[in-house]
Amino acid sequence: MRGIRITGWGIAVPDKVVTNDDLSLTLDTSDEWIVERTGIRERHIGGTTSGLAIEAAQEALRSAGRTAAEIDNLVLATTTPDGIVPGTAPSVQHGIGMHGGAFDLNAACSGFVYGLVTAAGLVAVGSGPLLLIGSETLSRITDMDDRKIAVIVADGAGAVVIEPVEGPGSLLSWNLNADGSLKHLLKCEHGGTLFMDGKEVFRRAVRVVVDSAERAMADAGLGPDDIDLMVPHQANLRIIQAACQRLSIPEERASIVIDRYGNTSSASIPLALHDAITSGRVHDGDNLLLTGFGGGMTWASAVLRWNG
Ligand code: UT7
């Protein structure tokens, strides 16, 4: 049996910081409304999906002590590829100078957890070290004059190096879920801009996150008290708070970066994971609960025993 272990991490965000006050200059909104309704204070806007992914991947490789030549496969979770064809992952592969497989995975904001499970599957059938990246430039597909959505979206990337280990490895449990009958709730047609039924997505998000997280904990043989750190998708602080409350996981045990980064879809979980690791909140043997949800609808959770 071959399991996985996360051995390196990196992030990249565009230089340009846009505060709520900046948005209030052109939109009928306010810092007070945005902070109260979403928890977001500022976000980074700009760059390209491949460019941010390359930067995050390079930092992850450095932190793992790996060279690009040692990486067998690259999985890029994104809902905002540079173009329709080809995929964006080959550009990232070329940009960092690796050889081997590279493909895009679009599971919207659940993409990083879907990618983690995909990476574990590749390792199980023989892959060597992998790069898993979540990278997004949501601002490119957003009508920045639509206050309902412009205030929450953001750009950024997070990457991890995943290595094979003998035995079960870190991934204790996982579930991947989708319901295409709800695709109308959050969508972007070719050439169009993002549409979101925010209230309905919010309502369903709390329910599915709780259900999926509870199943992942049960499958890992763990209860809420055993979770040392929850790493949720950063869509709205109120969704994170409601999920924590219903799961009986204290909010202090969640990694929350939405105030600084906004909603970066598939990049949000690796951004939050990176923040927790680099600020010393993750220790060997800790149980981490990763959980995401988004367009599709898709939702997914995984429990990791940190480098166990
Ligand atoms: O990441 C993928 C999944 N996405 C999500 O999980 C997002 C889930 N949804 C949300 O986070 C929230 O629904 C939003 C943050 C998008 C909106 O918050 P809300 O509390 O659901 O607001 P609402 O749409 O119900 O609007 C309440 C009021 C409305 O005014 P009226 O009709 O009560 O007079 C809106 O027109 O707030 C108004 N409003 C705003 N006011 C100031 C909506 N957007 C804004 C804004 N600034 N940016």
Image (cartoon, grey):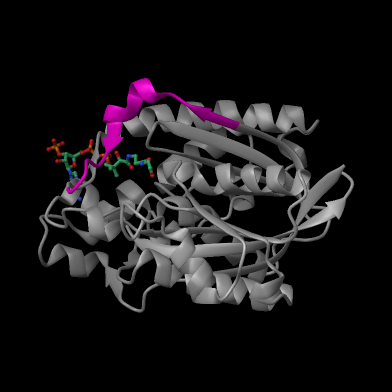
* Picture residue at 44% right of the left edge, 44% below the top: 106
Q: Is residue 76 left or right of residue 227?
A: left
Whole-percent x, y for residue 100 in the image: 62, 62
Left/right of residue 270 with respect to residue 198 in the rendered view: right
Q: Residue at x 52, y 61 (%)?
A: 271
Task: Tell me which residue sits at (38%, 49%) in the image.
Answer: 79
**Which region of the structure is painted magenta?**
176-191
Q: Is 303 located above or below residue 200 in the figure?
A: below
Of residues 250 and 195, the one nearer the viewer is 195
**How many numbered discs?**
0
Answer whether residue 190 is magenta in the image: yes
Tell me which image quadrant ligand 1 sits in: top left
Q: Residue at x 72, y 75 (%)?
A: 66
- Expressed as whole percent of the image width and height from the top left, the position of residue 247 reads 61, 32
Quadrant of res 124: top right
Vertical placement of 244 versus 132: above or below?
Answer: above
